[in-house]
Amino acid sequence: MEDAGDKAKTKDENKKVHHPAINKLKKEQEKKKKKKNSKEKNHKKNNEAYSDNDQNDELVVNFDLIDPDEIYKDNIKILLKNSELFNSIKCFEELAHIICEQQNIGKFVCIANEKEYDNLISFATIINLNQYTELTNLKEFFINKIEKINKNTELEENRKQIKMLIEKKDINIGLLIGNRIINCPIRLVPLIHKNLDEDIIWSQGIEDLDYSEKKFYFFDYILFYTKAYKNVNNPDQIIFFNFEEEHFFKHKLYHIMWNNNNIKKFYEIENEKNKETNYKEFVILFIIPYSKYQQVSEELQNSV
């Protein structure tokens, strides 16, 4: 693990990993009501004109897309806990440590030009379930979840296939782990996934990296573990916790989901009025081929 971290620090400067993602977040607020120009109104008999005095407030924030670093470990632990997906695993501390230590694959997004280390707004990484002995409990965590699912469902075959793939030690399954604060600019998301894929390709090509480690970066599948929501009155409608997961889900090989026993309230517009709607919360596991992860990561560049 340390070898990959050390080698990752010598990445080719031509590789677009550290370049800043600059996003302008515009918050427009009308300062005065627009006054109608009397010249444009036929019913006005005078020549009195009103000029628009709209003023725009513009907030410009710069973000850096950086490689993982141990200095952000506390931030990672907070984002992991906020996802509500990994709180019960026995190896939580080890997982947070490896997310920071695996510097060859992973991306952190932080506010640029800030000296403090509490400015992380998003992270994403892909970890091979068979690579780290410290994360043996993570595989057991997923297997236990799968075994507890009702076996008399239409997804029984999916359940068997996912469990079989996770249990195999000769298959490279990469677990996608990530989270972001709610106001993270959506345009950063495609960039994060594109850079993750570039990290993987770069790791596969490190010439002086021992094959005993390099082999773990040749992924066969990517595993998604996330939350989704179903309308109580329309169970066929699925809303994913993160918008990009819907795009990846279209290429699933197998998936299973189970009720999380939570109800979330959403507001929808109906007849120009806000309507409160209840959604059941589910946890979902799905697997896609690594080639499809690459494909969708590229397609996402034009999605927002």
Image: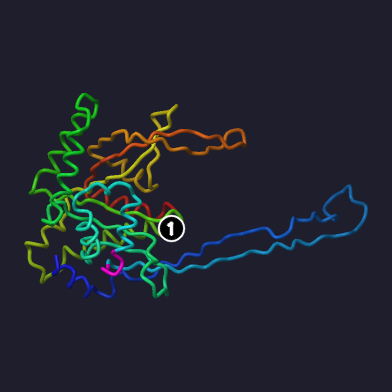
The magenta span reads 69-73
Q: Residue furthest top?
A: 152
Mark 1 residue element:
loop
Q: Where in the figure is residue 43, as x and y percent of width and height?
A: 89, 47
Task: Find residue 241 and report its image quarter.
Answer: top left
Point 38% across, 47% down: residue: 242
Task: Give the answer, above or below, for where 211 lies relative to 91.
Answer: below
Which residue in the protein does label 1 denote?
A: 184
Q: Residue furthest right?
A: 45
- In the visual, does 36 lie left or right of 234? right
Q: Which quadrant would the N terminus be assigned to in this image? A: bottom left
Q: Nearer the viewer, residue 33 or 304?
A: 33
Figure label count: 1
Q: Where in the figure is residue 74, as x and y percent of width and height?
A: 31, 63
- In the visual, does 71 lie left or right of 269? left
Is 38 a magenta residue? no
Disc 1 crowd rating (10 Å Cα; few below 14, some 14-19, many 20+) is: some
Q: Where in the figure is residue 91, as x and y percent of width and height?
A: 19, 53
Q: Amino acid at mark 1?
A: Cys
- In the visual, does 28 lie left or right of 125? right
Is 71 a magenta residue? yes
